[in-house]
């Protein structure tokens, strides 16, 4: 069967694109590997009417609603390659099967490259966090920290201080420049130069951070801004232009979410530097509508 559109990635961006194409009565195939970026978080915040909901439950509801449309097909698995054909695109699955479409929407997401600090990965999404707008309210007024991973960590520390008393853990990096130091002091951000050796606490809860000189510092939440990487090489295979974002590669798109390759759209975390569920869904809606209109008007 040939599809009007293949969507690679079945999280918030991909499903949002799919439902708009489905409502336009187009044949849509969603390929999903089943590993959304926010699977480590128990709750999602800030998405209107769904504040505090479990991300997995939100996606399950979305899939169920999408499955009610007769032109939608789901494939649980990985898309390993994609190529342009004379009349569209051919997508190769990990099984070796090849499926075809006229349009292609990339929504395969990104992965975070977490620092190799004992106790950090186990707390990712619970008490080791990235976005204060997503999880900061729950730690309001508590003891907060920011781990220095890049120059962007200075901005992150200044921002986090809005939610509570904040310490910037330089983790052995050089001290910030004088202008940055002055701004950190103005926002009452404490600075700890020692390397971070480990995180401690019961289960996923963070209680203390262990420093290189043996000291233990009490802490309730640690924010990090890790590097990220695209979950698939398909954008590069197709020749889509990439930009260097503050945390990793971002697929370049125009105002309709179309990439630099005609007929290929990109949505969600792979296509923007700032990430949350609302933006991912917004990008998916735009990509789905734009892909549909391109099928009509060329």
Image (tube, rainbow, N blue to C red):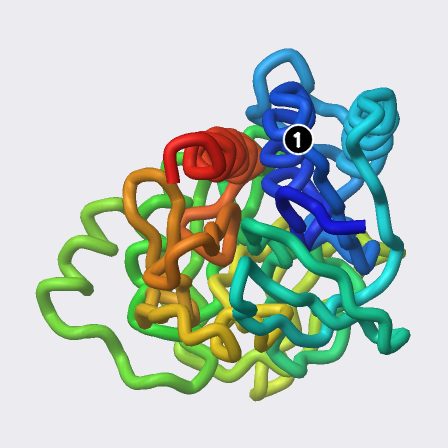
Q: Is residue 289 left or right of residue 50?
A: left
Q: Nearer the viewer, residue 135 or 289?
A: 289
Q: Nearer the viewer, residue 192 or 33?
A: 33
State the residue at coordinates (74%, 67%): 79
Q: Nearer the viewer, residue 166 or 2?
A: 2
State the residue at coordinates (40%, 78%): 193
The residue singled out by tag 1 in the image is 26
Residue 141 visible to the viewer? no
Residue 56 visible to the viewer? yes
State the residue at coordinates (44%, 58%): 167
Q: Is residue 275 left or right of residue 6?
A: left
State the residue at coordinates (29%, 47%): 254
Q: Is residue 235 left or right of residue 56?
A: left
Residue 86 x, y percent position in the rendering: 52, 66
Residue 100 x, y percent position in the rendering: 69, 59
Query: Is label 1 in a helix, a strand or a loop?
Result: loop
Residue 149 x, y percent position in the rendering: 44, 74
- The part of the image, by quadrant, that contains residue 246 is bottom left
- The part of the image, by quadrant, that contains residue 187 is top left
Q: Nearer the viewer, residue 201 or 263?
A: 263
Residue 239 x, y percent position in the rendering: 41, 75
Mark 1 Cα shell of 10 Å, populated few (<14), some (14-19), many (≥20)? many
Q: Is residue 39 left or right of residue 153?
A: right
């Amino acid at each position: 069967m040939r599809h009007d559109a293949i969507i690679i990635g079945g999280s918030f961006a991909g499903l949002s694109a799919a439902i708009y194409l489905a409502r336009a009565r187009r044949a849509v195939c969603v390929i999903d590997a089943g590993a959304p970026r926010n699977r480590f978080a128990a709750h999602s915040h800030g998405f209107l009417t769904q504040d505090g909901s479990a991300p997995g439950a939100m996606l399950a509801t979305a899939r169920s609603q999408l499955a009610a449309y007769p032109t939608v097909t789901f494939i649980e698995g990985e898309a390993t390659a994609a190529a342009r054909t004379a009349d569209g695109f051919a997508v190769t699955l990990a099984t070796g099967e090849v499926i075809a479409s006229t349009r292609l929407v990339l929504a395969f997401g990104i992965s975070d490259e977490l620092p190799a600090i004992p106790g950090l990965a186990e707390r990712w999404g619970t008490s080791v966090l990235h976005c204060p707008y997503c999880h900061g309210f729950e730690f309001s007024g508590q003891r907060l920290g920011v781990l220095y991973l890049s120059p962007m960590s200075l901005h992150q520390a200044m921002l986090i201080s809005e939610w509570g008393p904040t310490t910037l853990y330089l983790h052995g990096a050089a001290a910030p420049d004088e202008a940055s130091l002055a701004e950190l002091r103005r926002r009452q951000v404490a600075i700890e130069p020692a390397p971070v050796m480990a995180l401690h606490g019961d289960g996923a809860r963070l209680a203390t951070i262990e420093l290189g000189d043996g000291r233990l510092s009490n802490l309730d939440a640690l924010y990090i801004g890790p590097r990220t990487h695209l979950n698939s090489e398909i954008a590069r295979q197709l020749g889509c232009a990439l930009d260097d974002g503050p945390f990793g590669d971002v697929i370049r798109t125009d105002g309709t979410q179309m990439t630099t390759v005609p007929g290929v759209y990109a949505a969600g975390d792979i296509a923007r530097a700032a990430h949350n569920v609302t933006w991912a869904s917004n990008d998916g809606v735009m990509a789905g509508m734009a892909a549909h209109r391109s099928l009509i008007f060329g």
